[in-house]
Image (spheres, rainbow, N blue to C red):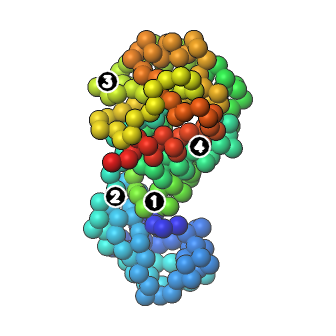
Amino acid sequence: MNLILFSAADKLDDKRIRLADARLQHLRKVLDANEGDALRVGEIGGKMGCAQLLSLAEDEAVLEVTLDQEPPKKLRLTLVLALPRPKMLRRILRSVAELGVPELHLLNSYRVEKSYWQTPVLQDATVQAYFLQGLQQSRDTVLPRLTLHRRFKPFVEDELAGLIGGRRALLAQPGNYPPCPVGANKPTLLLIGPEGGFIPYEVEKLQQVGCEAVSLGPRILRVENAVTTLLARLGAD
């Protein structure tokens, strides 16, 4: 935890916050914090800064905070991702927040198993918990926005064109396509399919809306590896 995040519910007043959950245990057991120590903190959705640990007891910690730093800029990128299996989804949610993606859309696809949509991982509180883990790691305070699309065709025909807007739309797909560019020098929409990629019908539908198919080369990557590789590639200066 490189940044202790707090919300309005943790505030005692304009300057002080109270921690009495897993963050308290992190202070005690991981950071080995003592009264008077300075710690990095951030308000969820707001600024970051430093806090002085005023008191540390078994059941609570009280900190005085000073917030004077803006969170880091997000990527100029919207990610549309075919819903992966739950175990992989957990890691991807953390990575999306950690790497600075501002907006994530999870999409159904022919190769997405119906059972994936029933996973408890998609519950709001669980999604937020994984996003917060990513933010704490990368020292950010702003949660990504998540939207679910349970039907592929209505999303592509009715919503995707509006979502693209003036962005460049890149469809990461295994096959003989041009290499994915390095650095997104304009707002970009990135689409990533399930293991093995989108089926030909889906690729055709996406291309009809204006998506440009690109490749990472001959290797077929796991979705989580494709996500981090593509985000790093497009996020490069």
Q: Of circles 1 and 4, which is in front?
A: 4
Instruction: For marks 1 and 4, give the CA distance.
Output: 18 Å
Q: Earlier in the sequence, mark 2 or mark 4?
A: 2
Q: Amino acid at mark 4?
A: Asn
- The residue under label 1 is 138
- Disc 3 is placed on an element classified as loop
- The residue under label 4 is 225
Q: Is residue 232 visible?
A: yes
User: Residue 163's image quarter?
Assistant: top left
User: In the rendering, at what x and y percent does residue 105 appear?
Assistant: 49, 32
Along the horizontal axis of the image, is 165 left or right of 175? left
Q: Earlier in the sequence, mark 3 or mark 1?
A: 1
Q: Earlier in the sequence, mark 1 or mark 4?
A: 1
Q: Of circles 3 and 4, which is in front?
A: 4
Q: Amino acid at mark 1?
A: Ser
User: In the rendering, at what x and y percent does residue 73 appear?
Assistant: 32, 51
Q: Amino acid at mark 2?
A: Pro
Of residues 68 and 211, which is closer to you in this image?
Answer: 211
- Disc 1 is placed on an element classified as helix
- The residue under label 3 is 165
Dot 3: few (<14), some (14–19), or many (≥20) neighbours within 10 Å?
few
Tell me, for residue 71, which label it has, or none. Answer: 2
Q: Amino acid at mark 3?
A: Gly
Instruction: For marks 2 and 1, give the CA distance.
Output: 10 Å
Assess whether mark 4 and mark 3 are in contact (beta carbons under 8 angstroms).
no
Dot 1: few (<14), some (14–19), or many (≥20) neighbours within 10 Å?
some
